[in-house]
Image (tube, rainbow, N blue to C red):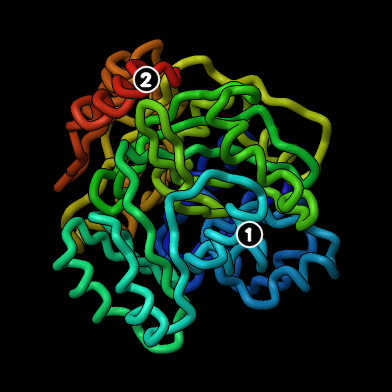
């Protein structure tokens, strides 16, 4: 099966590695990224539009591809992870709030101001002790009234501004996959942490009729069906003992969270993505376990060509390669810093963490680094969900 992956950041090329090893013919087209040394893992495209002609479907691991969807219609192809309408919502706080309101998702107490002058006038009646100021794709969390006064000075002219009462609780993401017609049975919940900092993630499966799914992400089905969207959807929620509110929306791939799909779905990634693209009446087999992923990076530049030790067929079952090239039977560092993502599942978070670090620890290369505190960070989140009887 011919598959085209479009990337700007290279974060999604681990998907290309897995799909290639499954026997698919994968081509990667990159902008703003150097793939010159990524040989022996996947093919590289020099012309995006020519590459569209013969592929089964396209995977877009980042948003912002002008004219892509017009070209896709011309060639009768589908893109997974991108839609021009939803891309606007991804980066606009007002559109996200309006979307939640229209489809009945629970939201925090919110006040909308049309511009800067409206905000300064309306702020006199705002009484929340903790406020999140949101505009475009920016937010400022003001935990004290004095911070709110400062935060208001950062808002640009001619922007809609949202004041939201900052909800108490813990932040999670409820995620799922839509195939243009219906939801797939692929819902999960994961702690919402910074992928920029932690480079790991843990997801727990949720059933289609779970109250968190039905209260939040499932309500978006009419919109996604109308738009014929194919791909992952994420809704950030703040959960407390008796309350759930939705704060953010994102359509598309999120990293490193996306790589939990490697263990989450029991079967080949290519088969799963084909059914996401085709809209077939297919439901995947998913794990009942916690799934954890950890990314290992190279912290120094100029080490391209250095050999990577410890990669074998068994470990490749539980990892994907990123900034790596292959010479004959040897794997070597390529230009970039994310070397591989390891994955594992387990009946408990501790089991999943132990297994994923077993893979990480056995791969060797110069200036290797990874975050080793997954268990300590993730456990409190899921412990609270268990205490509050959400899982």
Residue receiving disc 2: 388
Could you say which is closer to the camera, residue 120 or residue 300? 120
Give the Cα distance between marks 2 and 1: 35 Å
Q: Residue 148: where, in percent of width, then height?
A: 22, 68
Q: Note whether residue 40 is visible.
A: no
Given the current orientation, which residue lies at the most extreme front position? 125
Secondary structure at numbered mark 2: loop
Q: Residue 184: where, in percent of width, then height?
A: 69, 33
Please tell me in which quadrant of the rendered image residue 89 appears. Answer: bottom right
Q: Taking 173 as reference, is 303 above or below it?
A: below
Residue at image point 35% right, 81% down: 121
Given the current orientation, which residue lies at the most extreme top position? 347
Could you say which is closer to the camera, residue 331 or residue 184? 184
Residue receiving disc 1: 82
Residue at image point 48% right, 52% down: 12
Secondary structure at numbered mark 1: loop
Residue at image point 71% right, 73% down: 49
Q: Earlier in the sequence, mark 2 or mark 1?
A: 1
Residue at image point 36% right, 36% down: 191
Q: Taking 60 as reference, is 103 above or below it?
A: above
């Amino acid at each position: 099966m011919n598959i085209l992956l479009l990337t700007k950041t290279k974060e999604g090329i681990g998907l290309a590695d897995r799909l290639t090893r499954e026997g698919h013919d994968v081509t990667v087209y990159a902008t703003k990224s150097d793939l010159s040394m990524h040989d022996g893992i996947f093919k590289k495209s020099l012309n995006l539009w020519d590459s569209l002609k013969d592929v089964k479907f396209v995977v877009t691991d980042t948003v912002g591809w002008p004219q892509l969807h017009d070209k896709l219609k011309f060639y009768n192809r589908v893109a997974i992870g991108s839609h021009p309408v939803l891309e606007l919502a991804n980066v606009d706080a007002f559109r996200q709030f309006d979307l939640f309101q229209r489809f009945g998702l629970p939201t925090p107490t919110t006040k909308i101001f049309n511009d800067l002058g409206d905000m300064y006038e309306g702020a006199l009646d705002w009484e929340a002790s903790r406020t999140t100021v949101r505009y475009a794709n920016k937010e400022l969390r003001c935990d004290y009234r004095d911070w709110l006064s400062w935060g208001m000075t950062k808002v640009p002219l001619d922007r809609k501004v949202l004041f939201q009462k900052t909800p108490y609780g813990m932040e999670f993401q409820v995620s799922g996959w839509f195939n243009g017609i219906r939801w797939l049975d692929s819902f999960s919940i994961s702690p919402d942490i910074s992928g920029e900092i932690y480079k790991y993630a843990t997801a727990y499966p949720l059933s289609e009729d779970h109250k968190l799914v039905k209260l939040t992400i499932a309500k978006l089905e009419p919109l996604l069906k109308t738009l014929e969207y194919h791909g992952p959807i994420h809704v950030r929620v703040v959960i407390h003992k008796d309350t759930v509110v939705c704060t953010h929306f994102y359509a598309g791939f999120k990293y490193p969270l996306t790589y939990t799909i490697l263990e989450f779905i029991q079967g080949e990634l290519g088969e799963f993505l084909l059914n996401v693209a085709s809209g077939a009446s297919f439901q995947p087999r998913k794990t009942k376990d916690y799934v954890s992923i950890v990314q290992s990076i190279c912290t120094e530049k100029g080490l391209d060509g250095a050999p990577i030790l410890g990669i074998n067929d068994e470990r490749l079952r539980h990892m994907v390669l990123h900034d790596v090239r292959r010479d004959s039977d040897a794997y070597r560092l390529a230009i970039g810093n994310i070397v591989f993502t390891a994955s594992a599942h387990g009946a408990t978070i501790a089991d999943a963490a132990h297994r994923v670090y077993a893979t990480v620890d056995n791969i060797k290369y110069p200036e290797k680094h990874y975050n080793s505190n997954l268990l300590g960070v993730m456990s409190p989140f899921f412990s609270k969900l268990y205490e509050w009887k959400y899982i």
